[in-house]
Structures are given as structure tokens and as C-alpha cells.
Amino acid sequence: MNHHQAITDGPGLRLARPTPVRITEICPRDGFQNIKAFIPTAVKIAIIDRLIAAGARTLEITSMVSPKAIPQMADAADIIDHVSSHHPQVTPVVLVPNLKGAQRAHRQGIRHVSYVVSVSPAHNRANINRTHDESLADLAAIVAEFPDIQVVLTLATAFGCPFIGATSTAVMLSLIDAAVKMGIRGITLCDAIGVANPLQTERVLQAIRAAFPALDIGMHMHNTHGMALANMLVGLALGITRFETANGGLGGCPFAPGAAGNIATEDAVNMFQRMGYQTGYDLGRLIESAKTIQRHIEPNLTGSLVRSRDYREFDFIG
Ligand code: COA
Ligand code: ZN
């Protein structure tokens, strides 16, 4: 059977099945960075262990950023040490904003980084204090210095910016073009403030696909307006199978005022699994992990399943 064969699943919605979806768990980075009070390293590690027990195999475990910018990530080295020594089966990903971040990550054995650049120049300045040219120069330096690191270009504010509103698809395409010329093969589109709508998602994805047919595209959708799953479904229909989600629905960027959490991993897994897609996650364990987050870190989680009956006894998969 051709695993990429498109079949008609419903009126007009063409989904490729049974392709597994690849869900990167990003709660330990995106989720924790937005919590004001310092989360003890032991608590972070306990959550990471639970996420791995729940099936996470690719996790963004921390970021190598300035501890002045994000004090919550000051224990990045300890988190990496723990994951490398206890969980050799997982692929740890670290977010980096500059060459120094990549150097720190590489020194600790990290070989997968998310390199963050905002499509909005104003947000790039607020978040990492750089122009696009400066960000691209550091990306070139990382690629040159560390050919053994797999870099994914993480495009923040891909669908809108808290400072300038609409962001330019043309600017996004030119950033991707520069990165592709450096040898980058993957990007992640981040809706940092969660304002994308499904039609906009379709247009942005089609524009990127048309210009870069071979690019591996991932989606990272915040759920501020409740549209994250709808946008991911549009992505799925267009062949996107890589998604970043955060257990419990934690998440946000301290430099993106008004942003709410990511789509919760358990909610995304629940949708995909009920549709017949394999995710490799154990839903019950993910919900348990979210409840641990609720007890130790944030009582008011926004995810749906952590707050409701899971109706596991209903199996609607056709
Ligand atoms: N990790 C740790 N420290 C770093 C660093 C990194 N990746 N990059 C720079 N620094 C340190 C420098 O060593 C310097 O330290 P010092 O003051 O003790 O000498 C200080 O930070 C300032 O360095 P500079 O290169 O001038 O950076 P900046 O002040 O222009 O800030 C960033 C740029 C990228 C370091 C900072 O804005 C940042 O860390 N942003 C991350 C924001 C973020 O994580 N957002 C959410 C995720 S998208
Ligand atoms: Zn995010």
C-alpha cells in the first residue's frame, strides 16, 4: 500500500493515511519558559520523564538563551545532562537564538537545534534583539561551524505579530530561501500568538510548498483563539505530518504579549488517534503527565482533555 496515497475522508477533505504523524513535545521549552516562578529542575525532569514514558521520542527539552532574557531556562545544561544520560532512545532538541546558543548546545552533545527567527522584524528585535540579516549571519555561522548539527529554521510570528499585525509571506519566503541556500532542509511555522485561521494556513502552506517542494515543514500552533486543531487539520490535508505541541496546553512567548498556550499534546494525539493516525503516544499517560503539571506547576491548564472525561470507551475510528 502506498503510504502517501491520498484518500477522500469526507466532503472535500483529502487526507493521506495511514501516514504516522510526528509530534514533537515542546512543553519543557515553550511551556516552561512562560512560567514566571522558577520551576525546580527536579520538577522539570520529572515531567520530562513522564512525557518520555508517555511515548515522546522527539522533545524540545530546553533552550540555550540568555538567562537574563529567560531566567526559567538557566538550568538548560542540567536538563540536557539528564536526558542524555537517562534517555538515549530520545532525540533531544534545543532552541537556540544565536551562534553562542549552538556552541553551548553542541558542547553538550546536542545535534538537533531549532534556530528561531521571527518573520516580523519587530518581533525579531523584541525577542532576540536582531535584524533578519544578523539572524541569517548567525545561522550561516552555525551551519559552517557545526555541520553535524541538524538545524530546523523556526519561523516565529509566521501568521501574525503582536506588534505589527499581519506578517509578510514574501519576507517569510526570502528567509526560507536564504536558509535553504545554506543547506537547511526543515522549517517550523510558529503561530506564536495563535491568530492563524484555516484559510490563511492553507495559503501560507501552499505558497511555501510551491516555492520549496522538498522542504520538511512542521507546524507549531498556539491555541489563543481555539483554532489550532483546525489549522493543523488543514496542514494534515496538505501532507504536513510534523507538529509541535505542549502537554497540558502550556506555552507562550514572554516577548509576545497576549499569546496563550500551545495546543495540548493530549488533545492533538486524541484527535489524530481517533482519526486512525498513529502517533506513538499513550493518551492515558499523557493525561496523567498533564495532571502532574497541574499539581506542581500550573493549576489552570487550558487543554481540553485534562479538564474533561476522555470518553475512551467510544471508538469512532472507521
Ligand atoms: N546563551 C547564554 N547567554 C547568552 C547567549 C546564549 N545563547 N547569547 C548571548 N548571551 C549572553 C552574552 O554572553 C552576554 O552576557 P554578559 O552580559 O554576561 O556579557 C549577554 O547574553 C548579552 O549578549 P548579546 O550577544 O549582546 O545579546 P543581546 O543582549 O543582544 O540578547 C539574545 C540577544 C538572543 C541572547 C537574547 O535576546 C535572548 O536570549 N533571547 C531569547 C529569547 C527567547 O528565548 N524567547 C522565547 C523563545 S522564541
Ligand atoms: Zn510557541
Image (tube, rainbow, N blue to C red):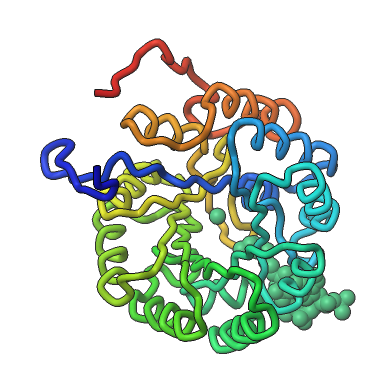
- In depth, the one of 17 and 199 nearer the eye is 17
Snapshot quadrant of residue 134: bottom right
On screen, residue 98 above or below 40: below
- In depth, the one of 245 and 68 nearer the eye is 245
Residue pushed farthest left? 11
| Label tally | 0
User: In the image, 62: left or right of 79?
Assistant: left
Q: Position of residue 270 (x, y in %)?
A: 43, 29
On screen, residue 108 above or below 103: above
User: In the image, 202: left or right of 227?
Assistant: left
Q: Is residue 38 visible?
A: no
User: In the image, 235: left or right of 289?
Assistant: left
Q: Position of residue 79 (x, y in %)?
A: 80, 50
Q: Residue at x 40, y 54 (%)?
A: 195
Q: Residue at x 57, y 58 (%)?
A: 257
Snapshot quadrant of residue 159: bottom left
On screen, residue 16 above or below 281: below
Q: Residue at x 66, y 37 (%)?
A: 52
Q: Residue at x 40, y 46 (%)?
A: 228
- In depth, the one of 293 and 257 nearer the eye is 293
Q: Position of residue 47 (x, y in %)?
A: 72, 35
User: In the image, 243: left or right of 19?
Assistant: right
Give the position of the N terminus as an image quadrant.
top left
**Quadrant of picture, ligand 1:** bottom right
Snapshot quadrant of residue 27: top right
On screen, residue 315 above or below 245: above
Q: Is residue 233 visible?
A: yes
Give the position of the C terminus as an image quadrant.
top left
Residue pushed farthest top? 313
